[in-house]
Image (cartoon, helix red, strand yellow):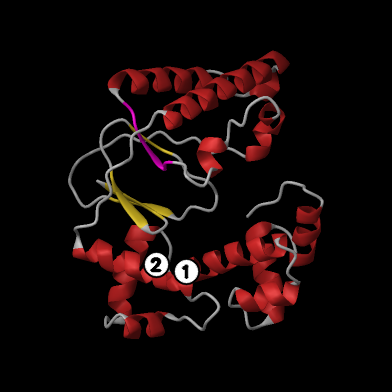
């Protein structure tokens, strides 16, 4: 089984731990008949902001050189599942204040465990041999390098000498996005970064490929929950905002 994260495809093996943040484009490429069991933990980073003043428990999710895939040995996997099950045992914490505290402690322990694994992790195996995978990586790289330009399904298909229907058939199974949704998502991410760098709303829109200002305002708020001006203001005040 393989797993796509941004523009890289990784070969997965038993007991692998995958670390993703909200900016990572990802998808399972399951082109075998092998069955697998998956455990997912999704959380809001704000839940652990009170812990970061003691130790950056989120470094494994946002550090520039962080590994995306951690190859756990059997002992590590067993320890992780023990902690995972311990966390799950504190369900419905709102019904009891003590349970909410126990849940927070259990989650902090789990993040510290992940941090330890990440610091000692060997690099994952990267799959580069499949021609379809190589082609898709080139397409993703091209999109990310030309976001400010007018990119469409037809123009991409023409550039890579494939049909639009074939492009759609290989793109979503690998990324989990349609071509158009992926382009919009990446443009919103770029606009977010530009706004954080004090670019004006107009400049952020143009440099991220939005030619229609009103459309940019609507789309940005749909994806982030903030208008571009609100987002920029919150960023300047060092408040936690998405992107």
**Rendered position, 76 above or below 163:** above
Q: Nearer the viewer, residue 138 or 168?
A: 138
Q: Position of residue 38 (x, y in %)?
A: 36, 36
Query: Circle 1 is placed at which residue position?
Result: 144
Say which residue appears at 67% left-offset and 65% top-offset.
194
Residue extending furthest toward the top: 98
Give the total of numbered labels.
2
Q: Give the position of the C terminus as an image quadrant.
A: bottom right
Does the magenta-highlighted stretch encompass residue 137?
Answer: no
Query: Circle 2 is placed at which residue position?
Result: 140
Say which residue appears at 59% left-offset and 62% top-offset.
189
Q: Position of residue 121 (x, y in %)?
A: 37, 32
Say which residue appears at 58% left-offset and 37% top-offset.
43
Q: Residues within 10 Å of mark 1 (few under 14, many from 20)?
A: some
Disc 1, SS = helix
Q: Nearer the viewer, residue 49 or 216?
A: 49
Q: Are marks 2 and 1 in contact (CB under 8 Å)?
A: yes
Q: Residues within 10 Å of mark 2 (few under 14, many from 20)?
A: some
In space, the residues marked 2 and 1 are separated at their CA atoms by 6 Å
Say which residue appears at 42% left-offset and 56% top-offset.
6
Residue 184 located left or right of residue 137? right
Say the numbered circle drawn on residue 152.
Answer: none
Disc 2, SS = helix
Q: Position of residue 5 (x, y in %)?
A: 40, 52
Which residues, given as a range, are shown in magenta? 67-72
Q: Position of residue 135 (x, y in %)?
A: 27, 68
**Rendered position, 99 above or below 176:** above
Task: Give the image quarter of residue 193.
Answer: bottom right
Residue 199 located left or right of residue 119? right
Task: Give the image quarter of residue 161.
Answer: bottom left
Does the magenta-highlighted stretch encompass residue 70?
Answer: yes
Task: Give the image quarter of residue 224.
Answer: bottom right
């Amino acid at each position: 089984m393989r797993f796509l994260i941004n523009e890289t495809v990784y070969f997965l093996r038993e007991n692998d731990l995958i670390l993703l943040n909200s900016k990572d484009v990802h998808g399972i490429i399951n082109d075998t008949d092998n069955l697998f069991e998956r455990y997912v933990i999704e959380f809001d980073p704000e839940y652990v902001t009170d812990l970061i003043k003691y130790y950056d428990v989120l470094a494994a999710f946002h550090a520039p050189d962080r590994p995306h895939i951690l190859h756990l040995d059997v002992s590590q996997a067993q320890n992780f599942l023990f902690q995972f099950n311990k966390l799950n045992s504190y369900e419905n914490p709102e019904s009891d204040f003590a349970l909410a505290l126990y849940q927070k402690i259990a989650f902090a322990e789990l993040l510290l465990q992940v941090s330890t694994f990440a610091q000692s992790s060997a690099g994952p195996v990267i799959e580069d041999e499949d021609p379809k995978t190589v082609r898709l990586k080139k397409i993703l790289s091209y999109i990310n390098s030309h976001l400010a330009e007018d990119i469409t399904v037809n123009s991409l298909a023409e550039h890579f000498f494939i049909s639009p229907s074939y492009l759609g058939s290989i793109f979503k199974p690998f990324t989990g996005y349609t071509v158009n949704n992926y382009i919009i998502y990446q443009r919103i991410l770029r606009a977010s970064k530009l706004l954080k760098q004090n670019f004006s709303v107009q400049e952020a829109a143009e440099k991220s490929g939005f030619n229609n200002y009103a459309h940019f305002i609507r789309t940005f708020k749909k994806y982030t929950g903030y208008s571009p001006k609100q987002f920029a203001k919150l960023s300047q005040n060092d408040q936690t905002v998405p992107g």
